[in-house]
């Protein structure tokens, strides 16, 4: 289960448009994220990500799935907090490792000790993730359960 699966499910349940930011970038670049990282580098990808995010956030009423690294740019965080309900979908290192599979599609998980790399990435991003409006641990939840929890956050309190 990942951000995109939750986003698609949530969008379907709420009858809203779903946007996967990585897919927007891939379409614009004509290549997969992993290829952008390999051929053009992470800095180039992050710049394209920032541009795509600003463009996507011009529309209202969408469910947007971003990559976890989008929060490394403070302007991205500000945009997301100002224009959207920013929800951090978190999970334990072991769960992330299991969900990531062999990691071939995840350029930041290259290397021999993927668990250590995940721990390192989570540590680097922890303060940024704390800026989300909502922090939701999905370790023991299904996609539908995560979507239901998010939907309950959107209901006005009586």
Image (cartoon, rainbow, N blue to C red):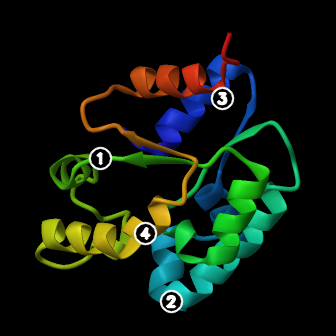
Q: Which one is earlier in the sequence, the residue at label 2 or at label 4? A: 2
Which of label 3 and label 1 is nearer to you? 1
Quote the CA–CA distance across marks 2 and 1.
Answer: 27 Å
Q: Which mark is residue 11?
A: 3
Q: CA distance from mark 3 to mark 1?
A: 21 Å
- Quarter holding the N terminus is top left
Nearer the observer, 132 or 139: 132
Q: Residue at x 58, y 48 (%)?
A: 133
User: Which residue extends farthest left?
Assistant: 113
Q: Secondary structure at mark 3?
A: helix
Q: Residues within 10 Å of mark 3 (few under 14, many from 20)?
A: some
Please indicate whether residue 122 sits to the left or right of residue 143 in the image.
Answer: left
Residue labelled with disc 4: 127
Comes first in the chain, label 1 or label 4: 1
Question: What residue is at 57 percent from the left and 37 percent from the top?
Answer: 7
* Alpha carbon distance from label 2 to label 4: 24 Å
**Residue drawn 46% across the image and 59% down it:** 130
Q: Which residue is disc 2 drawn over?
A: 41
């Amino acid at each position: 289960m990942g951000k995109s699966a939750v986003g698609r499910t949530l969008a379907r349940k709420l009858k809203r448009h779903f946007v996967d930011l990585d897919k927007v970038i891939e379409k614009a670049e004509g290549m997969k994220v992993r290829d952008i990282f390999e051929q053009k580098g992470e800095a180039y990808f992050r710049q394209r990500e920032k541009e795509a995010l600003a463009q996507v956030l011009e529309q209202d009423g969408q469910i947007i799935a971003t990559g976890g690294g989008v929060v490394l740019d403070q302007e991205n965080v500000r945009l997301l907090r100002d224009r959207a309900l920013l929800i951090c979908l978190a999970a334990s290192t072991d769960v992330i490792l299991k969900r990531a599979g062999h990691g071939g599609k995840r350029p930041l998980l290259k290397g021999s000790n993927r668990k250590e790399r995940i721990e390192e990435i989570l540590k680097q991003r922890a303060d940024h993730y704390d800026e989300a409006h909502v922090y939701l641990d999905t370790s023991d939840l299904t996609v539908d359960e995560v979507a239901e929890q998010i939907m309950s956050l959107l209901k006005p309190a009586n």
